[in-house]
Amino acid sequence: MYYGEIKNCDIANGEGVRVTLFVSGCTNRCPHCFQPQTWDFAYGQPFTAETEDYLLSLLAPEYVSGLTVLGGEPFEPENQRSLLPFLRRVRETCPDKNIWCFTGFTYEELLTEGSRPRCAATDELLSLLDVLVDGRFVEELKDISLRFRGSSNQRLIDLNATRRSGAITLLPDRKRGTL
């Protein structure tokens, strides 16, 4: 797997101060994507053990809330296979941090046997996530007032609550500038 960027102290891609990993490779290729350079699976730098160590060091400070993974497309099967051991390591090393992931696939697509993104790593990868922001960006549904996403079809899924209830549970959608 390759990655295009790592951001430290990011506040735009999830709640609190976050470390953000932009993976490379995406076959969704949403029109008007804000990161089209990350569609290329070889964009950026190789994701290595040193990259993992660096990310873990960035996650260490108490003020950092967690890790966000986006792209590109984290749920491309080849990316899932690389992310799974890393996210296991994050959970083991930083159990108090939360993990968010942005995907152009829907949660339902990820769970559907035979769907393009589903592979042997999908269920465990989902089990390691706290929040999934799902759905392709759709220009016609663009809404800059939405929290942590660009179009109204995308959802902020609280995966912990979803697992507990057995039904998709969304995070509250506070408008920017409100408490």
Image (tube, rainbow, N blue to C red):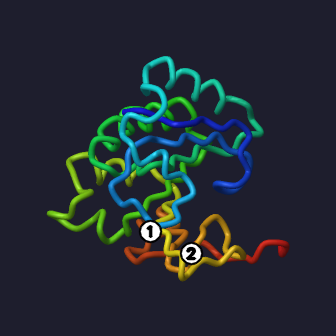
Within 10 Å of disc 1 (Cα), the crowding (few <14, some 14-19, many 20+) is many
Q: Which residue is mark 2?
A: 151
Q: Position of residue 127 (x, y in %)?
A: 38, 52
**SS at mark 2?**
loop
Q: Who's the residue at 64% across and 33% down the image? A: 59
Front-most of residues 2 and 33:
33
Percent coordinates x, y for residue 54 in the rendering: 58, 22
Disc number for residue 31: none
Q: Amino acid at mark 1?
A: Arg
Q: Quadrant of residue 66?
A: top right
Question: What amino acid does circle 2 point to?
Answer: Ser
Q: How many marks?
A: 2
Choose between 162 and 122: the one closer to the eye. Answer: 122
Name the residue: 22% across, 68% down: 112
Return the residue nearer the eye: 34 or 67.
Answer: 34
Q: From the viewer's perspective, is 4 left or right of 126?
A: right
Q: Residues within 10 Å of mark 2 (few under 14, many from 20)?
A: many
Residue at 77 percent of width and 39 percent of height = 63
Looking at the image, is mark 1 or mark 2 earlier in the sequence? 1
Using residue 22 as the reference point, say whether residue 59 is left or right of it: right
- Is 145 above or below relative to 82? below
Residue 163's x, y, as percent? 41, 66
In this rendered view, identify the residue nearer to me: 150 or 147: 150
Which of the numbered marks, if any, corresponds to residue 136? 1
Provide residue 111's location: percent of width, then percent of height.
27, 65
Q: CA distance from mark 1 to mark 2?
A: 8 Å
Disc 1 secondary structure class: loop
Quadrant holding the N terminus: top left
Marks 1 and 2 close (CB-CB < 8 Å)? yes
Extreme-top residue of the structure? 50
